[in-house]
Amino acid sequence: MSNGPEDNDGSPPGAGRSPEPFIVRAWAALVDGLAGLGTLMIGGLMLIICADIVVRNLMGGSLPLVSELGALALVMIVYLQLATTIRHNRLVRSDIVLSLLGGVAPRLRLALETLFDITGLIVIALIAWATLGILERDIQVGQYIGVTGVLILPTWPFRALILLGTTVAALQFLFQLLHRLRQLARGDGLQS
């Protein structure tokens, strides 16, 4: 899949390479599918918030669970869409500096991108590990959101999707890191 003007390996799209293996296409489908699920959840959250606004204006009260559901859904959406953001090189970073380095010191640029991937992998893996502990606790104690007798929802499905998103994002960082390390070892595209 293309990341814009260049693919992850630095070659222009369709530059005489063989087609991507099935596993690469399947991974891309999983990563982009999670992002699509996050997008659908944004639409659902918008509908819930609009319904709450209508109920507040017509009846003077609010729908149950809107604020709690919104808080959990926002975190879930961010983590479901994180891996595709990483995969398509859309995380916030100083592209101006990296572009300048690419022309002058391509090995330094690749080293900085590798350091970025290592840092991202560590941070996201720690978040995934912490989320696993929260998910286990939520399942053990039967954690829920809402008001008993009115409407309640268990929190573990939300936590499970957050864990899925963080795990996939950490794996995406790992795959990019391995790719960059191979580039550094081979010296691909590092001629000034």
Image: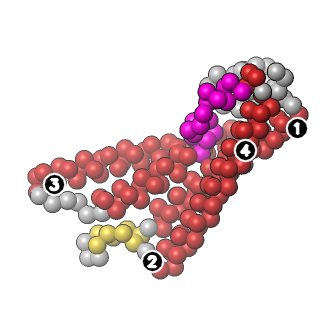
Which structural element holds mark 4?
helix
Q: CA distance from mark 1 to mark 3?
A: 61 Å
Q: CA distance from mark 3 to mark 4?
A: 49 Å
Q: CA distance from mark 2 to mark 1?
A: 49 Å
> Compared with residue 115, is residue 61 higher up or lower down, i.e. above or below?
below
Residue 49 appears in view: yes
Q: Earlier in the sequence, mark 2 or mark 1?
A: 2
| Residue drawn at 78 percent across, 27 percent down | 105
| Residue drawn at 77 percent across, 33 percent down | 108
Residue 182 place in picture, x, y as percent = 84, 39
Q: Which residues are magenta?
A: 83-101
Q: Which mark is residue 142?
A: 2
Q: Earlier in the sequence, mark 2 or mark 3?
A: 3
What residue sits right under mark 4 in the picture?
Answer: 115
Describe the colour scheme in one phrase: secondary structure
What residue sits right under mark 1 in the picture?
Answer: 185
> Compared with residue 108, is residue 12 higher up or lower down, i.e. above or below?
above
Q: Quadrant of residue 192?
A: top right
